[in-house]
Structures are given as C-alpha cells and as structure tokens.
C-alpha cells in the first residue's frame, strides 16, 4: 500500500487541519498494519518492483521500540537508510478512467499557525 503521510494535530484540537497537511512525504507499507488511524491517506499499491522495495527495506537501519517490559523490540520504524532511495520513475494505472485534475489545497502549516497565534498575544 502506498500512502501519503499527514500530520496528526488532534492533540492541539486541530483534527481537520491534519487532513490537509500532506505535501511530499509518503510511505510504502511492507506489512499489514491495523494501527493506521486516519493520519495516512492510502492512494495506491505496488504492482511491480516489490523486490526493489524489499532490498531498500532490508538495508535500512531499524530503530528499536521499547516494549512495556523495557526490552528492545527490533520491529520499530526505519531510522536511517544505507543510501537515500530515489524514485526515478513511476507509472499510474487508471484502468481507462480519465480523471480530472485534482483539486489542490495549500498544505496546513502548523508553524505558521502557531506564529499567528503568538502574534495575536505579543505586543512589542
């Protein structure tokens, strides 16, 4: 599954803004994950070249997760790639459907939002 990474601003009471925060980061799920909670927007799947993704994944340095018992679990997130993967081409199969251009929104910028809040309360 290929998904667009979005930010989760719900802790700030900004749930809707998180939906419009995706810009350039995306993920390719290598295994099933039932914990995805709406922060990611699935939009495709890999149909060819999975062996390339498996090679990239196998060469990545994995950040261990701490378990409830305080032990390290090697099923954590990727911390660093041996070499940065670069996508040189991709093909999108629309199965004959001619989609209109997508409606594009400016991505929500949490830093600009916080700066605006501060400027409302700060006096010089």
Image (tube, grey):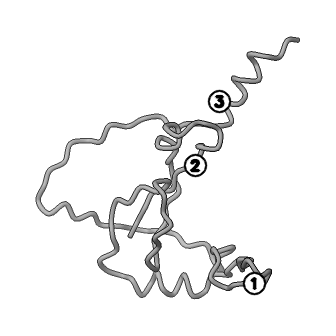
Q: Nearer the viewer, mark 1 or mark 3?
A: 1
- Residue drawn at x 20%, y 42% is 100
Q: Give the residue pinned by disc 3.
A: 113
Q: Which mark is residue 8?
A: 2
First in sequence: mark 3 vs mark 2: 2
**Where residue 68 sits in the image (x, y, percent)?**
73, 77
**Where residue 17 sits in the image (x, y, percent)?**
52, 37
Q: Alpha-carbon distance for marks 1 and 2?
A: 26 Å
Q: Alpha-carbon distance for marks 3 and 2?
A: 14 Å
- Name the foreground residue: 22 vs 52: 22
- Residue drawn at x 57%, y 36% is 14
Q: Give the residue pinned by disc 1.
A: 72
- Name the foreground residue: 23 vs 84: 23
Q: Alpha-carbon distance for marks 1 and 3?
A: 37 Å
Query: Is the C-beta separation of discs 3 and 2 under 8 Å?
Result: no
**Where residue 73 sits in the image (x, y, percent)?**
69, 84
Q: Residue furthest left?
A: 96
- Name the foreground residue: 14 vs 23: 14
Q: What SS does tag 3 mark?
A: helix
First in sequence: mark 1 vs mark 2: 2
Q: Quadrant of residue 4?
A: bottom left
Q: Quadrant of residue 103?
A: top left
Q: Residues within 10 Å of mark 2 (few under 14, many from 20)?
A: some
- Name the foreground residue: 28 vs 87: 28
- Residue drawn at x 19%, y 48% is 99
Q: What SS does tag 2 mark?
A: loop
């Amino acid at each position: 599954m290929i998904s667009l990474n979005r930010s989760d601003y719900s802790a700030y009471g900004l749930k809707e803004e998180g939906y419009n925060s995706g810009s350039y980061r995306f993920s390719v799920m290598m295994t099933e994950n039932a914990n995805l909670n709406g922060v990611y927007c699935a939009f495709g799947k890999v149909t060819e070249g999975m062996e390339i993704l498996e090679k990239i994944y196998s060469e990545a340095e994995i950040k261990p997760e701490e378990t409830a018992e305080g032990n390290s679990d090697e099923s954590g997130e990727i911390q660093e790639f041996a070499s940065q993967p670069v996508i040189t081409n991709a093909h999108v199969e629309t199965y004959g459907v001619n989609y209109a251009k997508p409606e594009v929104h400016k991505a929500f910028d949490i830093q600009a939002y916080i700066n605006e809040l501060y400027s409302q309360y700060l006096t010089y």
